[in-house]
Amino acid sequence: MSTPPAPSKGIARWIPGLALFRGVTSSLLRTELIVAITVFAVLVPSAMAYGDLAGVTPVAGLYVALAAMVMYALFGTSRQVIMGPEATAAIMTAAAVAPLAGGDAARYASLAALLALLVGAVSILARIARLGFITDFLSKPVLVGYIFGATLIVIGSQLGKMFGLTLESDKFFQQVVELISRLDETHLLTFAIGATCMVVLLVIRRVNRKIPGPLIVVVGAILLSSLLGWEEMGVKVVGPVPAGLPQVAIPSVSFSDILALLPAALALMILIYADEILTSRVFATKHGQKVHANQEFVGIGMANFGAGLLTGFPAALSASRTTVSDQMGGKSQWVGLIAAALTIIFLLFFTPLLAPLPTAALGAIIIVASLGLIDLPAFRFLRQVRRAEFWLAIVTAFGVLTVGVLQGILVAVMLSLVNIIYHISRPHDALLDEVDVSGGTVYRGVGDKETSLTMPGLVVYRFDAPLVFANAAFFTERLEELVADAGAELKCVILDAEAISDFDSTAAEALETVDANLERLGVELWIARANGPLRDLLQVTGLTDRIGADNLHPSVRSAVTAYRARFGTP
């Protein structure tokens, strides 16, 4: 069984998962069933925990998982990806929906479902417009900072459950301060339950990650809660969970609700797609497969359409369940389909068993899962590579923690763009010097040098970036500095243009100004190593005629040779 290569004809182009039903064997299904049971064991407690984290009923997490696994299996192109409820999507749902719901639980659920539908809609539109490049705006520093900040928000949102308190604050730092100030109100039994669950989860993770720790914790907590009557002792429990399958419904909302949630839906879509495409490509490379980037928009979109229609909330890639499936030997999306079937059985017959489950156990599951997302070495790496990127990650994390997830990401993306513009406007450049090596003469960039002259009367200058409006002024200023430093003996400037891969009208005007200024000083401007497109642009803008076609050289060496011949320099 292999992932379909996005066929170019017929309905299979849009529903690549139809290939799952061709050539399926009983041996494959047996293998996938074993994997699916393990995935399901991890799914139930985590899905319920993320439903609670999103601010809806815990069972809504199972609705999201059911819809997302089926829809992605049909419309996605990765063998390994398991879609469903996940921490970051859940916390962003809560951040976007809570201010609009006004404490109305029914309206909250409708808005969460609407958000999932909007994520689905913008994902499909992104597929039509082929907008895969939008994830390029989420640089590594932004992602590192966002994940760190969002993880702390997730952990902070569970502190109240762990201590048996209802925290009034909704910001991380305020929650920590409030918790410290109210430690004397801690419900000790609740705290003991949550702490014990965390210890069990951490020990199981350390011993063997393949053991379904969350399932063991949930089953154990339910049994002990039922036997010991924890609810009567003041421990908050999940309570009655409706049995049966969710109804397919379009949420009852207004047009103003759509407009209010649209920015959050766009931000969620970008983050979900970035995470999904990066992770799916890792697994595809590992197994020698291929993921089709634009079709993944459809897979994500349909998964969220399904989640919204089943009164859920936005679905995303589940890194934990995807990893479990891969480690257990899952070979296809049959794992997701079978796990979805098991979810249906669970919803029909077993949800009443969840009523005595302490919410502290769900909080422990979320906190332990979130701890695995904290990546401090990533900050050290950024600091070693470039301090500006390290501080961008710090600012992103701080922004997410203080002003909110969506606003923090927006600020970080804007800072990323400013950082990009700064580096484009101040690119690397070099004054080249003639160096004799065993293979002959080469021209290399030099650092400190008493004069800007490469040799008597000559400056060879390399500009290591596209020459466009953002850096045209910098280019002009640098050449003016080099010319002034060279003094009156300067006869010629050779521009090494190998790295100038783009050239616009502002750059053409700047180059014309440079040439005119040099001409007034009696200095010639030559260009070496201009590529084909740049030569064409020089021709179109009239710069070839101004500079002289004979002064365009294929290499720096040939230009220097021509300079020596022309000016008689040794």
Image (spheres, rainbow, N blue to C red):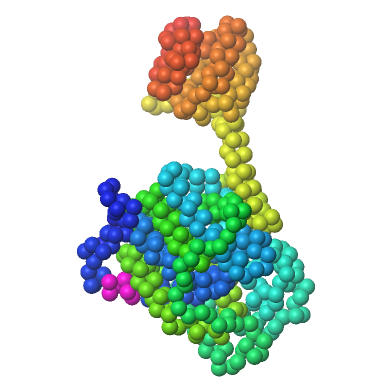
Residue at the image position 55 percent from the left and 91 percent from the top: 226
Residue at the image position 47 percent from the left and 64 percent from the top: 309
From what the image shows, is residue 182 above or below residue 382?
below
Q: Provide residue 9's location: percent of width, then percent of height.
A: 27, 48
Q: Is residue 30 magenta?
A: yes
Residue 78 image-quadrant placement: bottom left
Q: Main secondary structure of the magenta part?
A: helix
User: Which residue extends farthest bottom?
Assistant: 227
From what the image shows, is residue 313 above or below residue 196?
above
What range of the chain is rendered magenta? 29-35
Tell me the quarter of the image containing the N terminus.
Answer: bottom left
Residue 10 placement, left or right of 149: left
Q: Nearer the viewer, residue 17 or 307?
A: 307
Residue at the image position 43 percent from the left and 7 percent from the top: 565
From what the image shows, is residue 493 above or below residue 387?
above
Residue 122 placement, left or right of 516: left
Residue at the image position 58 percent from the left and 15 percent from the top: 514
Q: Is residue 206 magenta?
A: no
Q: Nearer the viewer, residue 122 or 421?
A: 122
Q: Provide residue 326's location: percent of width, then percent of height.
A: 37, 66
Let me know if residue 21 appears in the view: yes
Let me know if residue 279 appears in the view: no
Q: Provide residue 364's location: percent of width, then percent of height.
A: 58, 75
Q: Nearer the viewer, residue 305 or 156?
A: 305
Q: How many marks?
A: 0
From what the image shows, is residue 507 above or below residue 566?
below
Q: Nearer the viewer, residue 401 or 520?
A: 401
Residue 321 image-quadrant placement: bottom left
Residue 448 image-quadrant placement: top right
Q: Provide residue 76's location: percent of width, then percent of height.
A: 37, 57
